[in-house]
Amino acid sequence: MMSNRRRFLRRVAAGGLTVGTLGTVGLQGVEYVTGGPRESQTTPARALVAGSLLVLADDVAGADVEAHGSLTARNLVVDGARDPDVLALADPDLFSGITAETTLFATNALVLAYDPESRYADAIADDWATGLAREGVRVGQTDPKADPLGYRTVLAMRLADDRGLAAAELLDDSLVFPETALMRTLEAGKIDAAFVYENMAVEHDLPFVDLPPAIDFSDPARVDTYATVSLDLPDRTVRGAPIRYGVTALTDAGAAWADSLATDRDRLRDHGFTVPDDYPLVQSIE
């Protein structure tokens, strides 16, 4: 069943929203650097964030924001290619080796967004699995080697397989895009549907289908179920787990921005994130 969500209203600073595009050798896709709304003339912090946080992060004053898939962002820091003041990622495990703790500030759900103008829109909305299985449907996803959205998509289809639904094969002919480009590609009608986070669909005002809680990584009570699937990546093995976002100030200059990102619960919910009652919550990183 399709979820009806409130229309997301973008707030644009008086001076306008500026988005620049950089090409970087050795990185997959395109990265975005945004200035965000300005409240003072002080030097902004340098924020490196998950691609799914880009729209939200630009709505938080006080930082220049660069976005990539979380795994790519982590590797940029570890390899010394970036030295941000604050780091916000879509999987707290990726902070390992960077910081001893992170602040959990939001959760999310994996959903299937679709183009309402697609010839397959009704079929996808009625039954997402059979809709995606129809000949000619173009499905988008992100790269499991670049971001948690990519590996969670693969893991979700494996969970669905375990429940008797032949879902993994739905990704056999999928088209892979950078996390920062996936929604623009869907909005442009170049694909019919894409596995995304709920906040991404809300922010872009696109219809989406809720996946079953047993496979969407939204329910902390299902942690044992999620953990039954895993995926081997070049430098790690990832296991299914509830989706959680973490933020850490790596310098004093990033502290205020990190605090603003993590503590404005209304803003997080307006952007389509879920905020548990006990968040923000500091978590130790092994």
Image: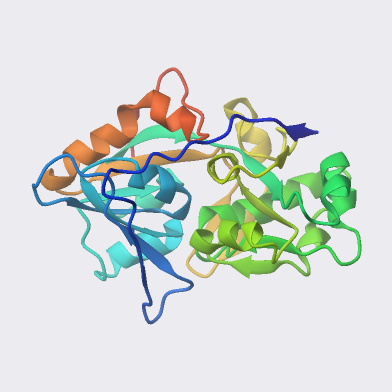
Question: Residue at horizontal 61%, vertical 25%?
Answer: 221
Quarter of the rendering containing residue 199: top right
**Which quadrant would residue 106 be assigned to in this image?**
top left
- Tell me the quarter of the image containing the C terminus: top left
Q: In the depicted view, which residue is nearer to us: 116 or 82?
A: 116
> Whole-percent x and y of residue 216?
67, 39
Would you say 279 lies left or right of 198 here? left
Q: Going by the image, does 153 lie left or right of 18?
A: right
Name the residue nearer the viewer: 57 or 238.
57
Nearest the viewer among 223 and 89 is 89
Q: Residue at x 85, y 57 (%)?
A: 119
Quarter occupied by the N terminus:
top right
Residue at the farthest top position = 277
Q: How many numbered discs?
A: 0
Name the residue furthest left. 42
Q: How is the rendered protein coloured?
A: rainbow
Does 231 sit above or below residue 240?
below
Residue 129 showing in the rendered view: yes
Q: Residue at x 72, y 53 (%)?
A: 115
Q: Position of residue 109 (x, y in %)?
A: 60, 38
Residue pushed farthest bottom? 25
Q: Residue at x 12, y 42 (%)?
A: 40
Q: Position of residue 285 (x, y in %)?
A: 34, 42
Q: Is residue 213 left or right of residue 52?
A: right
Q: Is residue 165 visible?
A: no
Expressed as whole percent of the image width and height from the top left, the position of residue 204 reads 56, 46
Seen in the image, is 198 located left or right of residue 246? right
